[in-house]
Amino acid sequence: MCMPVNSSSKMWDLKTDDFPRFSNELTPFQQEVFSLMKEFGVDFDGKTILDIGCGTGVYTLHLAKKSKKVYALDFSQKMLDTLTEDGKRFNILNVEQVCCDFKTYDGEGVDFVFCSMSPALLEKEDFKKAFSFAKNGFIYLGWGGKRESTVMEKIFNAHGEKLHAPPGANRLKEWLELKGFEFKNRYLETLWEKKSKLEDAIRFEGWHLKMHGIEPNEKKLRAVLKEFVNEDGDILTTTKVGLELIVWVR
């Protein structure tokens, strides 16, 4: 069960159209992640999974293909609807939507709890609650301290701020070590690329500024982004990211 959705879900609704969507084939990076999960002792066969902050389901639907059932939890109904649409398109039907802020979630235990790149788990209380639902294991893929993007760096600098990676894996590791939980982990790096037209890039990058508590200045945004428009009228944003996979299995 769940309390009403937090109003900040509107920000994530706005992000949906710019968010990656499920591909029926694993990307090379996802292949590495799933291979490591298996190496670390995770077996999804016949299991139930709670995917916290599932977004549009880029991992959720792959998890569903390997398991009995996935509870897809997110407080953006628009993202969940996109996930369900893609699930139906590929006949992946063992996923149940849970439109909810995780802080108010009150469901039943599952075999595995999974969380990928979601701000839903940031504090000790969040980790404790997530673990309370995990009967067999907990899997987390989060920021590992690296985010490098020439475009984003110039945008943040133009607003008097510095680009940095959001908090993530280090906080969880500190909590696990404090609790004496043994876990396996691996630092991974990958490259994100996004091609967009100027107006779309202004909206997209403005959203990122707002998520960091920075009020976007459209004049500054437009000036910076115009520097990166190529001869085809596109802006290619390349971001080098460092992520960390953390796995705890009973």
Image (tube, rainbow, N blue to C red):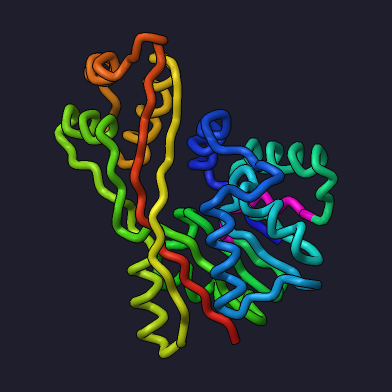
User: Looking at this view, is 155 or 42 the one in front?
Assistant: 42
The residue most toward the bottom is: 180
Name the quadrant containing residue 156. Answer: top left
Q: Can the viewer see residue 208 in this picture? A: yes
Say if 96 sits above or below 110 in the image: above
Magenta-colored stretch includes residue 108: no
Residue shown at 33% from the left, 52% from the top: 166
Q: Position of residue 227 (x, y in %)?
A: 24, 16
Say if 198 sits above or below 107 in the image: above
Q: Position of residue 114 (x, y in %)?
A: 59, 65
Q: Can the viewer see residue 103 in this picture? A: no
Name the quadrant containing residue 123. Answer: bottom left
User: Looking at this view, is 196 or 83 the one in front?
Assistant: 196
Name the quadrant containing residue 68. Answer: bottom right
User: Looking at this view, is 57 or 229 the one in front?
Assistant: 229
Left/right placement of residue 132 relative to residue 219 reads: right
Residue shown at 82% from the left, 56% from the top: 94
Q: Position of residue 89 (x, y in %)?
A: 80, 37
Residue shown at 40% from the left, 10% from the top: 233
Left/right placement of residue 164 relative to residue 34 reads: left
The residue most toward the front is: 28
Left/right placement of residue 189 relative to residue 95 reads: left
Residue shown at 31% from the left, 47% from the top: 147
Please state the extent of the stretch shown in magenta in the rendering.
95-104
- The number of numbered badges drawn on the structure is 0
Q: Position of residue 46 (x, y in %)?
A: 81, 72
